[in-house]
Protein backbone atom coordinates (compact mmCIF):
# COMPACT_ATOMS: atom_id res chain seq x y z
CA UNK A 1 0.00 0.00 0.00
CA UNK A 2 1.12 3.53 -0.74
CA UNK A 3 3.05 5.14 2.16
CA UNK A 4 1.03 8.31 2.73
CA UNK A 5 3.53 9.53 5.29
CA UNK A 6 5.91 10.21 2.42
CA UNK A 7 3.15 11.85 0.42
CA UNK A 8 2.35 14.27 3.24
CA UNK A 9 5.94 15.29 3.88
CA UNK A 10 5.87 18.27 1.49
CA UNK A 11 2.82 19.68 3.27
CA UNK A 12 4.50 19.15 6.63
CA UNK A 13 7.77 20.88 5.81
CA UNK A 14 10.20 17.99 5.35
CA UNK A 15 13.23 20.22 5.07
CA UNK A 16 12.97 21.51 8.63
CA UNK A 17 13.97 18.00 9.74
CA UNK A 18 16.47 17.21 7.04
CA UNK A 19 19.03 19.82 8.20
CA UNK A 20 20.85 19.35 4.92
CA UNK A 21 22.91 22.08 3.31
CA UNK A 22 20.68 24.04 0.92
CA UNK A 23 21.28 23.46 -2.75
CA UNK A 24 22.74 26.23 -4.88
CA UNK A 25 20.05 28.91 -4.77
CA UNK A 26 18.35 30.37 -7.79
CA UNK A 27 19.03 34.08 -8.00
CA UNK A 28 16.23 36.56 -8.38
CA UNK A 29 15.75 40.24 -7.71
CA UNK A 30 14.04 40.61 -4.35
CA UNK A 31 12.31 43.99 -3.94
CA UNK A 32 12.69 45.62 -0.53
CA UNK A 33 9.81 45.53 1.93
CA UNK A 34 8.52 48.60 3.65
CA UNK A 35 9.61 48.81 7.27
CA UNK A 36 7.26 47.04 9.68
CA UNK A 37 5.44 45.17 6.90
CA UNK A 38 5.02 41.96 8.83
CA UNK A 39 2.85 40.27 11.42
CA UNK A 40 0.34 42.67 12.96
CA UNK A 41 2.05 46.00 12.26
CA UNK A 42 2.31 47.96 9.03
CA UNK A 43 0.29 47.94 5.84
CA UNK A 44 -0.33 44.21 5.63
CA UNK A 45 -1.07 42.01 8.67
CA UNK A 46 0.63 39.02 7.05
CA UNK A 47 3.47 40.63 5.11
CA UNK A 48 3.95 40.29 1.37
CA UNK A 49 2.72 37.30 -0.58
CA UNK A 50 -0.26 36.62 1.66
CA UNK A 51 -1.44 34.60 -1.36
CA UNK A 52 1.05 31.94 -0.17
CA UNK A 53 -1.01 31.54 2.99
CA UNK A 54 -4.15 29.50 3.63
CA UNK A 55 -7.30 31.62 3.76
CA UNK A 56 -9.18 29.49 6.29
CA UNK A 57 -6.33 29.76 8.78
CA UNK A 58 -6.10 33.53 8.26
CA UNK A 59 -9.85 33.85 8.80
CA UNK A 60 -9.51 32.13 12.18
CA UNK A 61 -6.79 34.61 13.14
CA UNK A 62 -8.83 37.58 11.94
CA UNK A 63 -11.64 36.61 14.33
CA UNK A 64 -9.33 36.92 17.35
CA UNK A 65 -9.55 40.14 19.33
CA UNK A 66 -6.45 41.48 21.08
CA UNK A 67 -6.68 41.29 24.85
CA UNK A 68 -6.34 44.86 26.21
CA UNK A 69 -4.69 43.67 29.44
CA UNK A 70 -2.20 41.34 27.72
CA UNK A 71 -1.38 44.05 25.18
CA UNK A 72 0.02 46.24 28.00
CA UNK A 73 1.66 43.46 29.96
CA UNK A 74 5.47 43.67 29.84
CA UNK A 75 6.01 40.94 32.45
CA UNK A 76 8.48 38.32 31.31
CA UNK A 77 9.85 40.50 28.51
CA UNK A 78 13.40 41.81 28.10
CA UNK A 79 14.30 45.15 26.55
CA UNK A 80 16.56 44.77 23.53
CA UNK A 81 18.20 48.07 22.66
CA UNK A 82 18.78 49.20 19.08
CA UNK A 83 22.11 48.34 17.55
CA UNK A 84 24.17 46.96 14.68
CA UNK A 85 25.72 43.52 14.25
CA UNK A 86 27.23 41.19 11.68
CA UNK A 87 24.57 38.66 10.64
CA UNK A 88 25.52 35.29 9.20
CA UNK A 89 27.76 32.23 9.53
CA UNK A 90 30.60 32.15 12.04
CA UNK A 91 32.36 28.78 11.74
CA UNK A 92 32.94 25.71 9.58
CA UNK A 93 29.49 24.34 10.41
CA UNK A 94 27.79 27.28 8.71
CA UNK A 95 25.72 26.38 5.65
CA UNK A 96 25.60 28.28 2.35
CA UNK A 97 22.36 30.06 3.22
CA UNK A 98 24.14 31.73 6.19
CA UNK A 99 26.38 33.73 3.82
CA UNK A 100 27.47 36.35 3.04
CA UNK A 101 27.95 37.71 6.52
CA UNK A 102 26.59 41.25 6.39
CA UNK A 103 25.95 44.34 8.51
CA UNK A 104 22.46 44.75 9.97
CA UNK A 105 20.90 47.50 12.07
CA UNK A 106 17.79 46.84 14.13
CA UNK A 107 15.48 49.11 16.08
CA UNK A 108 14.97 48.52 19.76
CA UNK A 109 12.22 46.12 20.81
CA UNK A 110 11.00 43.95 23.67
CA UNK A 111 11.39 40.16 23.54
CA UNK A 112 9.93 37.35 25.62
CA UNK A 113 12.62 36.07 27.96
CA UNK A 114 11.39 32.52 27.33
CA UNK A 115 9.57 30.50 24.76
CA UNK A 116 5.78 30.63 25.13
CA UNK A 117 4.79 27.97 27.65
CA UNK A 118 1.87 25.57 27.81
CA UNK A 119 0.36 27.63 30.63
CA UNK A 120 0.52 30.82 28.58
CA UNK A 121 -0.93 29.17 25.49
CA UNK A 122 -3.69 27.61 27.61
CA UNK A 123 -4.76 31.10 28.77
CA UNK A 124 -4.93 32.20 25.14
CA UNK A 125 -7.05 29.21 24.10
CA UNK A 126 -9.34 29.62 27.11
CA UNK A 127 -9.87 33.29 26.25
CA UNK A 128 -10.46 32.86 22.51
CA UNK A 129 -11.56 29.27 21.84
CA UNK A 130 -8.84 29.03 19.21
CA UNK A 131 -8.24 25.60 17.63
CA UNK A 132 -4.70 24.89 16.43
CA UNK A 133 -3.95 23.62 12.95
CA UNK A 134 -2.81 20.24 14.31
CA UNK A 135 -6.28 19.80 15.80
CA UNK A 136 -7.95 20.22 12.39
CA UNK A 137 -8.20 17.76 9.50
CA UNK A 138 -5.79 18.39 6.60
CA UNK A 139 -7.33 20.28 3.69
CA UNK A 140 -7.05 18.06 0.61
CA UNK A 141 -7.16 21.05 -1.74
CA UNK A 142 -4.18 22.63 0.00
CA UNK A 143 -2.32 19.31 -0.16
CA UNK A 144 -2.87 19.13 -3.92
CA UNK A 145 -1.07 22.46 -4.36
CA UNK A 146 2.11 21.12 -2.77
CA UNK A 147 2.58 17.74 -4.43
CA UNK A 148 3.38 16.94 -8.07
CA UNK A 149 0.44 16.64 -10.48
CA UNK A 150 -0.89 13.10 -10.74
CA UNK A 151 0.19 12.12 -7.23
CA UNK A 152 -2.05 9.52 -5.61
CA UNK A 153 -3.88 11.29 -2.80
CA UNK A 154 -4.83 9.98 0.65
CA UNK A 155 -8.34 9.12 1.75
CA UNK A 156 -10.46 11.28 4.06
CA UNK A 157 -9.61 8.96 6.96
CA UNK A 158 -5.91 9.47 6.38
CA UNK A 159 -6.38 13.24 6.48
CA UNK A 160 -7.74 13.26 10.03
CA UNK A 161 -5.95 15.49 12.58
CA UNK A 162 -2.47 14.34 13.52
CA UNK A 163 0.99 15.68 14.20
CA UNK A 164 4.51 14.30 14.16
CA UNK A 165 6.16 12.85 17.24
CA UNK A 166 9.79 11.84 17.60
CA UNK A 167 10.55 8.15 18.23
CA UNK A 168 14.11 6.80 18.37
CA UNK A 169 14.63 3.94 15.88
CA UNK A 170 15.76 0.71 17.59
CA UNK A 171 18.92 0.50 15.49
CA UNK A 172 20.84 2.12 12.66
CA UNK A 173 22.77 5.37 12.34
CA UNK A 174 22.49 8.73 10.65
CA UNK A 175 24.00 7.32 7.44
CA UNK A 176 21.46 4.51 7.12
CA UNK A 177 18.34 6.24 8.49
CA UNK A 178 16.15 9.07 7.24
CA UNK A 179 13.66 11.38 9.00
CA UNK A 180 10.84 8.98 8.07
CA UNK A 181 12.46 6.52 10.48
CA UNK A 182 12.21 8.78 13.53
CA UNK A 183 9.17 10.96 12.86
CA UNK A 184 5.86 9.19 13.45
CA UNK A 185 2.45 10.38 12.33
CA UNK A 186 0.35 10.19 15.49
CA UNK A 187 -3.37 10.85 15.21
CA UNK A 188 -4.52 13.03 18.07
CA UNK A 189 -1.06 14.45 18.78
CA UNK A 190 -1.29 18.20 19.34
CA UNK A 191 -0.30 20.83 21.88
CA UNK A 192 -2.65 19.34 24.48
CA UNK A 193 -1.37 15.78 23.88
CA UNK A 194 2.24 16.35 22.83
CA UNK A 195 3.12 12.65 22.54
CA UNK A 196 -0.31 11.58 21.29
CA UNK A 197 -3.48 10.20 22.93
CA UNK A 198 -2.86 9.31 26.55
CA UNK A 199 -0.27 12.04 27.07
CA UNK A 200 -1.32 15.23 28.88
CA UNK A 201 -0.01 18.58 30.03
CA UNK A 202 -0.13 17.59 33.69
CA UNK A 203 3.02 18.90 35.35
CA UNK A 204 4.12 20.55 32.09
CA UNK A 205 2.91 24.13 32.54
CA UNK A 206 6.44 25.51 32.22
CA UNK A 207 7.42 23.50 29.18
CA UNK A 208 7.34 25.33 25.83
CA UNK A 209 4.15 24.77 23.88
CA UNK A 210 4.76 22.57 20.80
CA UNK A 211 2.84 21.22 17.82
CA UNK A 212 2.08 24.86 17.01
CA UNK A 213 2.52 26.07 13.45
CA UNK A 214 3.25 29.60 12.21
CA UNK A 215 -0.46 30.43 11.99
CA UNK A 216 -0.97 29.33 15.60
CA UNK A 217 1.94 31.52 16.71
CA UNK A 218 0.55 34.51 14.80
CA UNK A 219 -2.86 33.94 16.42
CA UNK A 220 -1.31 34.00 19.90
CA UNK A 221 0.68 37.12 19.03
CA UNK A 222 -2.46 38.97 17.96
CA UNK A 223 -4.24 38.12 21.21
CA UNK A 224 -1.22 39.13 23.30
CA UNK A 225 -0.59 42.40 21.43
CA UNK A 226 2.78 41.16 20.25
CA UNK A 227 4.30 39.80 17.04
CA UNK A 228 6.86 37.26 15.88
CA UNK A 229 10.46 38.45 15.65
CA UNK A 230 12.05 39.00 12.30
CA UNK A 231 14.95 36.70 11.55
CA UNK A 232 17.34 39.63 12.01
CA UNK A 233 15.84 40.55 15.38
CA UNK A 234 16.06 36.94 16.51
CA UNK A 235 19.75 36.59 15.63
CA UNK A 236 20.63 40.02 17.06
CA UNK A 237 18.96 39.12 20.35
CA UNK A 238 20.39 35.59 20.31
CA UNK A 239 23.94 36.90 20.07
CA UNK A 240 23.39 38.95 23.21
CA UNK A 241 25.81 41.67 22.15
CA UNK A 242 28.59 39.17 21.32
CA UNK A 243 29.14 39.93 17.67
CA UNK A 244 31.41 36.98 16.84
CA UNK A 245 29.78 34.43 19.17
CA UNK A 246 28.91 31.04 17.69
CA UNK A 247 26.38 30.27 20.45
CA UNK A 248 24.15 32.44 22.67
CA UNK A 249 26.60 31.92 25.55
CA UNK A 250 29.72 32.67 23.49
CA UNK A 251 32.36 30.44 21.90
CA UNK A 252 32.43 27.43 24.24
CA UNK A 253 31.12 24.28 22.48
CA UNK A 254 27.63 23.06 23.24
CA UNK A 255 27.33 20.81 26.29
CA UNK A 256 24.71 19.38 28.63
CA UNK A 257 25.35 22.33 30.94
CA UNK A 258 24.57 24.88 28.21
CA UNK A 259 21.41 23.77 26.40
CA UNK A 260 18.83 21.04 25.85
CA UNK A 261 20.06 19.17 22.77
CA UNK A 262 20.48 15.54 21.71
CA UNK A 263 23.42 14.01 23.61
CA UNK A 264 24.62 10.74 22.17
CA UNK A 265 24.25 9.12 18.77
CA UNK A 266 21.39 10.78 16.93
CA UNK A 267 18.73 9.52 16.44
CA UNK A 268 19.24 6.11 18.07
CA UNK A 269 20.88 6.64 21.45
CA UNK A 270 20.03 9.56 23.74
CA UNK A 271 22.46 9.66 26.66
CA UNK A 272 20.24 12.14 28.52
CA UNK A 273 23.20 13.82 30.19
CA UNK A 274 21.19 16.98 30.92
CA UNK A 275 18.37 15.02 32.57
CA UNK A 276 15.80 15.88 29.89
CA UNK A 277 14.67 13.10 27.59
CA UNK A 278 12.66 15.50 25.45
CA UNK A 279 11.61 19.07 26.31
CA UNK A 280 12.93 20.96 29.32
CA UNK A 281 11.11 23.59 31.41
CA UNK A 282 11.93 27.14 30.35
CA UNK A 283 14.77 28.71 32.35
CA UNK A 284 16.44 25.32 32.93
CA UNK A 285 19.69 26.74 31.56
CA UNK A 286 21.48 30.05 32.09
CA UNK A 287 20.33 32.98 29.93
CA UNK A 288 22.46 34.75 27.35
CA UNK A 289 23.92 38.21 28.19
CA UNK A 290 20.62 39.89 27.26
CA UNK A 291 18.69 37.73 29.74
CA UNK A 292 17.06 35.46 27.13
CA UNK A 293 16.63 31.76 27.89
CA UNK A 294 16.75 28.80 25.49
CA UNK A 295 17.95 30.72 22.47
CA UNK A 296 19.77 27.46 21.71
CA UNK A 297 18.03 24.09 21.80
CA UNK A 298 14.78 22.96 23.44
CA UNK A 299 12.46 23.99 20.54
CA UNK A 300 12.82 25.62 17.15
CA UNK A 301 11.23 29.09 17.17
CA UNK A 302 9.10 30.63 14.43
CA UNK A 303 10.14 33.93 12.84
CA UNK A 304 8.01 36.31 10.79
CA UNK A 305 10.13 36.04 7.62
CA UNK A 306 9.68 34.03 4.47
CA UNK A 307 12.70 31.86 3.66
CA UNK A 308 15.03 32.14 0.68
CA UNK A 309 18.54 30.63 0.69
CA UNK A 310 19.83 33.57 -1.36
CA UNK A 311 18.29 36.33 0.74
CA UNK A 312 21.52 37.48 2.38
CA UNK A 313 23.13 37.86 -1.05
CA UNK A 314 20.36 40.29 -2.02
CA UNK A 315 21.35 42.80 0.67
CA UNK A 316 23.57 45.67 -0.44
CA UNK A 317 25.34 47.70 2.23
CA UNK A 318 23.95 47.82 5.76
CA UNK A 319 20.49 46.30 6.03
CA UNK A 320 18.24 48.41 8.27
CA UNK A 321 15.45 46.56 10.03
CA UNK A 322 15.25 43.87 7.34
CA UNK A 323 11.88 42.17 7.14
CA UNK A 324 12.96 39.16 5.11
CA UNK A 325 12.45 38.43 1.40
CA UNK A 326 9.25 39.38 -0.38
CA UNK A 327 8.67 35.79 -1.46
CA UNK A 328 9.71 32.24 -0.56
CA UNK A 329 11.90 29.78 -2.39
CA UNK A 330 13.30 26.50 -1.12
CA UNK A 331 15.28 24.57 -3.77
CA UNK A 332 14.61 21.35 -1.84
CA UNK A 333 10.84 21.86 -2.25
CA UNK A 334 10.11 24.58 -4.84
CA UNK A 335 6.34 24.14 -4.55
CA UNK A 336 6.17 24.68 -0.78
CA UNK A 337 6.45 28.22 0.64
CA UNK A 338 8.51 28.28 3.84
CA UNK A 339 8.90 30.43 6.93
CA UNK A 340 12.12 30.70 8.91
CA UNK A 341 12.63 28.90 12.22
CA UNK A 342 15.60 29.55 14.50
CA UNK A 343 17.42 28.23 17.55
CA UNK A 344 17.54 24.46 17.17
CA UNK A 345 15.78 21.94 19.41
CA UNK A 346 16.19 19.02 21.79
CA UNK A 347 16.84 16.90 18.70
CA UNK A 348 19.82 18.88 17.38
CA UNK A 349 23.24 17.26 17.45
CA UNK A 350 26.57 18.21 15.85
CA UNK A 351 26.60 14.97 13.89
CA UNK A 352 23.35 15.90 12.18
CA UNK A 353 22.02 19.38 12.86
CA UNK A 354 23.89 22.17 14.64
CA UNK A 355 20.77 24.35 14.75
CA UNK A 356 21.69 25.76 18.16
CA UNK A 357 24.28 28.05 16.54
CA UNK A 358 23.02 31.67 16.57
CA UNK A 359 23.54 32.01 12.80
CA UNK A 360 21.89 28.70 11.85
CA UNK A 361 18.84 29.06 9.59
CA UNK A 362 16.13 26.50 9.03
CA UNK A 363 12.79 26.59 7.26
CA UNK A 364 9.42 24.90 7.25
CA UNK A 365 5.95 25.36 5.81
CA UNK A 366 3.78 27.70 7.88
CA UNK A 367 1.08 25.05 8.41
CA UNK A 368 3.53 22.62 10.04
CA UNK A 369 3.58 21.91 13.77
CA UNK A 370 5.92 19.36 15.34
CA UNK A 371 6.97 18.09 18.74
CA UNK A 372 10.14 20.21 18.58
CA UNK A 373 8.73 23.53 17.34
CA UNK A 374 7.46 26.47 19.39
CA UNK A 375 7.92 30.25 19.46
CA UNK A 376 8.52 33.40 21.46
CA UNK A 377 7.15 36.88 20.84
CA UNK A 378 8.42 40.43 20.55
CA UNK A 379 6.79 43.83 20.91
CA UNK A 380 7.71 47.19 19.39
CA UNK A 381 8.89 49.93 21.70
Image (cartoon, rainbow, N blue to C red):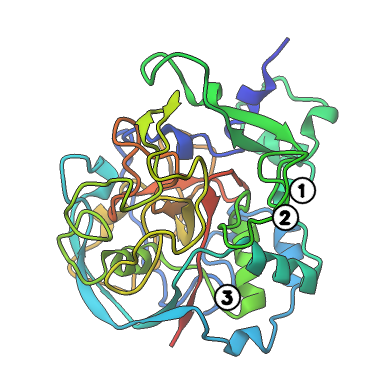
Residue 214 image position (x, y, % from top left): 58, 56
Q: Considering the numbered disc 3 on the image, is that residue within a helix, a strand or a loop?
A: loop
Other residues around mark 1 within 10 Å, as few (<14) / some (14–19) / many (≥20) = some
Q: At 16% across and 40% down in the image, what residue appears?
A: 92
Residue 267 seen by the camera: no
Q: Between marks 1 and 2, how big is the CA–CA gap? A: 5 Å
Q: At 18% across and 67% down in the image, what residue appears?
A: 242
CB-based contact (under 8 Å), mark 3 and mark 2 = no
* Residue on which the image places disc 2: 132
Quarter assignment of residue 72: bottom right
Other residues around mark 3 within 10 Å, as few (<14) / some (14–19) / many (≥20) = some
Q: At 69% across and 22% down in the image, what residue appears?
A: 4
Other residues around mark 2 within 10 Å, as few (<14) / some (14–19) / many (≥20) = many
Mark 3, mark 1: which one is toward the viewer? Answer: 1
Disc assigned to residue 135: 1
Q: Considering the numbered disc 1 on the image, is that residue within a helix, a strand or a loop?
A: helix
Q: Between marks 3 and 2, how big is the CA–CA gap? A: 19 Å
Residue 372 image position (x, y, % from top left): 53, 45
Q: Give the mark nearest the N terminus, 3 or 2.
A: 3
Q: At 52% across and 83% down in the image, what residue appears?
A: 75
Q: Considering the numbered disc 2 on the image, is that residue within a helix, a strand or a loop?
A: loop
* Above or below 306: residue 3: above
Q: Horizontally, is 193 left or right of 29 in the view?
A: right
Outermost right residue = 157
Quarter assignment of residue 167: top right
In the picture, the quarter occupied by the N terminus is top right
* Residue on which the image places disc 3: 40
Amino acid sequence: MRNYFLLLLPLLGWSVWSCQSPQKPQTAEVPPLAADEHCYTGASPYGTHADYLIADFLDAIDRIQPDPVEAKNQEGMVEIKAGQFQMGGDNAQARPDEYPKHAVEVKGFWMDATEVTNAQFQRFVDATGYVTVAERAIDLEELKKQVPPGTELPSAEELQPFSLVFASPPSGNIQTLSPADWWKMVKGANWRQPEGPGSTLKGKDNLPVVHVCWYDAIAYCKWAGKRLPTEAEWEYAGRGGQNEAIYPWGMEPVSAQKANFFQGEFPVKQLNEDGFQRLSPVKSFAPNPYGLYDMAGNVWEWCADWYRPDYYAQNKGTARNPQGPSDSYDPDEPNAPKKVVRGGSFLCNDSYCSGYRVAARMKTSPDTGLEHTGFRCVRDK
